[in-house]
Amino acid sequence: MQDFETLLKGSADAHGHLCPGQVVGVRMAMLGCRLIGLDDPKRHDQIKKLIVYVEMDRCTSDAISYVTGVRLGRRSLKFMDYGIMAATFVNLETGKAYRILSTEEARDLVPVYAPEINEKSVQQLRAYLKMPDSVLFRVQRVRVPMSEFDMPGPTHRKVSCSRCGQVVRDHRELQLDGMTLCKPCAHGAYFKNAQEVTWPDMNWSPQQGADLKALTRESKRQRTEGKESK
Amino acid sequence: MLKKIKLKEAVGSKLAHDVTEIRPGEFKGPAFRKGHTVCEEDLCRLQRLGKNHLYVIDVEEDEIHENEAVAILAKSLAGEGVVWKDEPKEGKIKLLADRDGLLRVNTTALAAFNMVDEVMCATLHNHTLVKEGESVAATRAIPLVMKRAPIERAAAIASQNGSVVSVKSLRHARVGLVITGNEVYHGLIEDGFAPILSEKLDALGSHVMVVGFAPDDVDAIARVIRSHLEKGCDLLLLSGGMSVDPDDVTRHGIMQAGATEIHYGAAVLPGAMFLVAYLGEVPLLGVPACGLYHRVTVLDIVLPRILVGEHISKTELAFLGHGGLCKDCAECSYPHCPFGKGM
């Protein structure tokens, strides 16, 4: 794993700005990986061993994703919408899992750790750099039961919603009154009044412009370099 | 885990904690000690103390009793020059100075430590002069039985920079005084500074090795400073010429002598025109004229810190502002007053 400063800089670049959440996220990720015994989670031989559950969609989550390399699309990043500044790091190989919580005390202690700074977010940044892990975090050893349908890898199961016909992957369908339903049909969705529409330039496609062979070559080259650097 | 049992059913069981008795103005202490086996005769007294139920302890594997907890806390809090005995009284352990010296409190770590729910630690003010055997802090774990993890986390927080409380011995400095001012140099008035400064230094275990006089002249002041250093002085106190009048050139003399660092002005009254400079490793303290009139000034706050080897710079002098205003009481009770205790 790279050193803290390098990770923080990279994380801030990827996120868009340096903020207190980046400091907390980078530190949380470094601690989480250390606790579950991964020293370089982005390396090819470790990347498939790690799953991280984040419990907030805040700056901190971006930093955690940056440091550990977990991604929503790889199914290695799980978002639990709890609104809690916490993340759980799971080593799939050993089953070891630790939930790290960012303490509320740390927020109250910011002026104590950086009394010389007036501006709030700079003061937070400085204080979160100074605080030891023991002040910044509480850690719980946890067990994370995971079904085979939560794991990275190919889709194991597809069924169709018996109301709307939509295909539902990975056992996310629900059984209600003997019917197999997608979640929007079973419990309602985050959207309302869905009306199917047409849109301008409906027949556009990138087919003509893309050099598929070149794209494949480039992607393969990057994968090989990743393996060699391990 | 604690189990609550009725007093009547407690005969034969062991007390989980000290039972405190308070007779107003007369006595406060344990009426019964932890571990005491309750017998029939005790029931009346326990009832008089307001106890109708007692706790019986059943400590789980991941739990810890307050006495074991407080010992872990005391160990993590106590640094150099601080001792404690593993004999908790009512769950509390006192931390004592094992030498005369200056108490140093890591107030940041202390605040972070006290933010952990299950623990507390109270200390004397940072930078208090203490005597051997004096209590400098006390700690306790609040619940009778608690989880082990928060106690260990609190202990880790306490030891983040070594410890929370330590007592540093004051070095015995060989001090050179530089008394500046034409009025003294030419014998128009008698110097009042040397006796006052000598007495303050003696009280702290240092002594004045040499006293030099200089007129309000940059070169002359620089010469006296260099001469003191050649004689082996490892701390210089300079009086006079510290204000902003045109004749006040002591600062320039200090610069001329080759000061590597110079900080003029402290957020303290009396003592706003105090100066701290360094010539290599040797500190130079410029004492403004208020030192002649006021019994206690910024010098009394800074001098002990210099003598324990603390490097005083702009930040330290600025942070003195909170609590840096002397109330100028008719009867001065310093050091038992808030002056200089803000940081």
Image: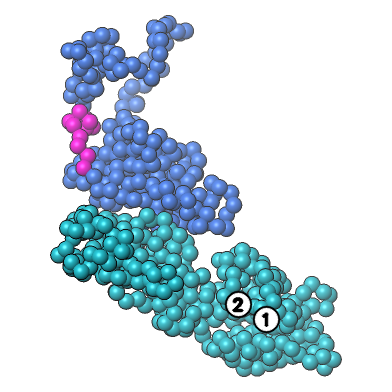
Q: Nearer the viewer, residue A85 or B174?
A: A85
Residue A53 at x, y percent in the picture: 30, 38
Residue A48 at x, y percent in the picture: 24, 39
Tell me which secondary structure the magenta stretch mostly adopts.
loop
Seen at 34% across and 38% down, the residue is A54
Identify the secondary structure beneath mark 1: loop
Check residue B334 in the rendering and tell me which mark sits there, or answer none: 2
**Chain containing mark 1:** B
Q: How crowded is mark 1: few (under 14 residues within 10 Å), some or many (20 or more)?
A: few
Q: Which color is chain B depicted in? A: cyan
- Determine contact: label 2, label 1, CB under 8 Å: yes
Report if residue A8 is visible in the image. no
Residue B102 at x, y percent in the picture: 50, 78
Can you identify the residue that label 1 sits on?
Answer: B295
Q: Which of A227 and B261 is in front in this view?
A: B261
Seen at 32% across and 60% down, the residue is B50
Q: Separation of disc 2 and disc 1 at Cα?
A: 9 Å
Which part of the image, by quadrant, shows the N terminus of chain B?
bottom left
Among the 4 quarters of the image, the one containing residue A70: top left
Magenta range: A143-153
Q: Which amino acid does label 1 sit on?
A: Arg
